[in-house]
Amino acid sequence: MNGLPRWLVLPAVLGALLVVLPVASLLTRVDVGSLWLLLTAPGARDALWLSLRTSVVATVLCVLLGVPLALLLARASFPGRRLVRALLLLPLVLPPVVGGLALLTLLGRSGLLGGALEVIGVRVPFTTAAVVLAQAFVALPFLVLTLDGALRSHDTAHEDVAATLGARPTRVLRRVTLPALAPALVSGTVLAFARALGEFGATITFAGALQGVTQTLPLEIYLQRSSDPDAAVALSLVLVVVALAIIVAAYGPWPPPVPEPGAPSPAAATGRTYAEVGTYRTSRPARGADAGGTASDGPTGVAGDAGVAAGGRSRPPASLRVHVRVPERGVDVAFEVSPGEVVAILGPNGAGKSTLLQAVAGLGSHGGDATVAVGDRMLTGPGVPTLPPRDRRVGWLGQRALLLRHLSVADNVAFGPVSRGMRRAAARSLARSLLADVGAAHLAVRRPHELSGGQAQRVAIARALATDPDVLLVDEPFAALDVGAAQHARLLLQSAHRAAPRTTLLVTHDLLDVAQLADRVIVLEHGRVAEDGPAAEVLTRPRSSFGGRFAGVNLLVGRVAEAAGNGSTDALGAGPGRTADIAEASNVVLTTALGDVHGTSDDLLDLGAEAVALFEPRAVSVHREPPGGSPRNAFSVVLTGIEPHGPLLRVWATAGRAPGGHSAEVSGTGASGVAGAVGAAVPEHIAADLTPAAVAELGAAPGERLWFVVKAAEVTVLLR
Ligand SMILES: Nc1ncnc2c1ncn2[C@@H]1O[C@H](COP(=O)(O)OP(=O)(O)OP(=O)(O)O)[C@@H](O)[C@H]1O
């Protein structure tokens, strides 16, 4: 019973019997011997034939009118949309006879439109056309509501990608939206047909019962009921059989839809620090070398640089200028990217990364204003018409591969070039070449559901490059892949970029992406640029809270309180705006939320200036009692968590209050280390890496107050 109470069985069985028993008893009344005779009687034949013809025409009408209606209701925003949706429910709840009366008041001889139609010699009521209209009136909501539900439960990600590939709206509708809607369209159409076939009340009111003209099967059954009950039962059997066939067609035991390859999985975080990433950097294959396949990717390797030539640039790389302002999301970001530069966009959740990418691609409706220029081409901005995504030449590669499931792999890659006007044969040949470049030539004839996540993402890379975009937007492209497949795809992107540099914005939470792909890093915090610098600089000497957490170093933000040069112990005295009168200060004191922090610096420091103190977690020792002697940096902290970190344990603490007072702030640190820790930026969080034995000896639990100690020589102070 799957945990359900047993008493449910009785009402459930009674409910099923309420529907099944009457139909079953109808079957027992059928006189099989005279069935054929009854069904082929002229009245019955005419009624059946009329019902089938009018139901088919009414269903076609429903599809032609209902599909656009459902699309607009689900995807467009216009005044009164909710009202229209509610009104469409009316035929479902109104007695059909009321529907028939409503049609009469509109199209009858003295109706709103009927009078005018009479004048031009068109009479609708009591004709076969009236039967069709009555059937369509009651059947349309079934189709619209089925499609509307399906549309609203689908996101528009596939349509968005198709638009960035250059497809015009009608092509997106025809090649992306409608194929994705096909199952719902079939269900809705079948339901509409069934409803039209069984329609009675509206038909008899609006069309009457003229044999061969308006007397459909339900009407014939009703009329035969008094004169020839056996014929009525036999005809009812026909309707039951047709209805059963329809139900099987619509809801039969068809296989469930296959999940999209590369659907997000929780295995996103890497938990590696920059130092660890260095191993990857040194071990990566040389330019053009084969990186080898992974178990999940099949036997193919990564093509070398030369191999990506087919995806090479037909134009030189272009610069990118961006200013995105979305006040309602608290986003105001501006920067420029040099031609061919790869800029990693980092930041905690909600920092504005997706809003930024959407604005550059022209997707979504964020309601803000944006200025985006690629080279000399203004994509959007004050005083210039906003280019739609299809005309921007801005490619998109996201976490999900978003391949079109009804197309083969080769046709997926050819989709963009064909959308941009390339002849089909040429596009196919380009697709084959690009698939070979990404080691997926052998997958060309497969459907997306026959691919692994890694294979699907490789195809998505080929598809994104096929249109040769001026700017590539890459949004956590490897986050849903396992480590091997992610590295494989990462190398592919790197290889393609080396062969044909392309201006790229790369949103990521993964250190490996930054280390391997990015020239420069922009850190967003609270919708603003918090840090912008060369990738190596941000990863080794971060200036922002998030940058520090991302790079796996402790970072405390503060103001310069003292700065003394070259070992001199003379404090120059605090005071905002007062400049140290030495070129380089080596010993520095920074006032931070954790207290004064002593460190060294090579920067020219102004007293009172904002600066950051950096130190590695492994440089921190942890004590239960205040340490003896006079260590320069001893911070009283509250333990917030312990997590594995390679062979060590990473102990996290914050400058919160111990239990009893307000609880300490808890960081967004995931169990997976740095990459997992990027969900939140709490500046005063610091970490210490200890051996498991040291942690056991310490015996501390989250919430306890401890002392974190770090030598001044281990602390580097940088200007912010
Ligand atoms: N559709 C929306 N309507 C209103 N506000 C939104 C919408 N989408 C995002 N926001 C808000 O805009 C801000 C920026 O969100 P955005 O999705 O751009 O952040 P993000 O950096 O991409 O975050 P994440 O890493 O979680 O994807 C957040 O405060 C968010 O709550």
Image (spheres, helix red, strand yellow):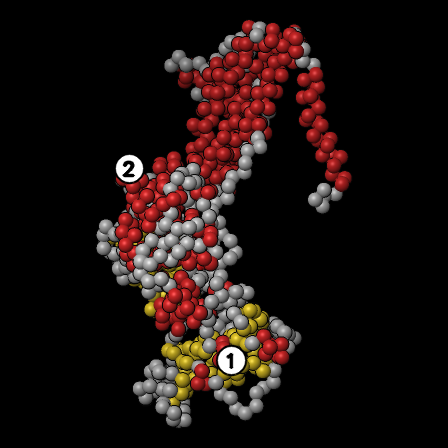
Q: Position of residue 181 (x, y in %)?
A: 46, 36
The mark nearer the N terminus, 2 or 1, is 2
Q: Position of residue 534 (x, y in %)?
A: 33, 69
The image quarter in which residue 168 lies:
top left
Q: Position of residue 719 (x, y in %)?
A: 37, 78
- Name the residue beneath numbered marker 2: 425
Relative to 373, say whether 622 is above or below. Answer: below
Relative to 294, say whether 520 is above or below. Answer: below
Q: Position of residue 581 (x, y in %)?
A: 32, 88
Tell me the distance, in whole angstroms, between the alpha carbons under discs 2 and 1: 63 Å
Q: Give the position of the C terminus as an image quadrant.
A: bottom left
Q: Answer with the quadrant where ligand 1 appears in the image.
A: bottom left
Q: Which mark is residue 642?
A: none
- Callout 1 secondary element: loop
- Name the residue beneath numbered marker 1: 620
Q: Residue at x 43, y 37 (%)?
A: 406
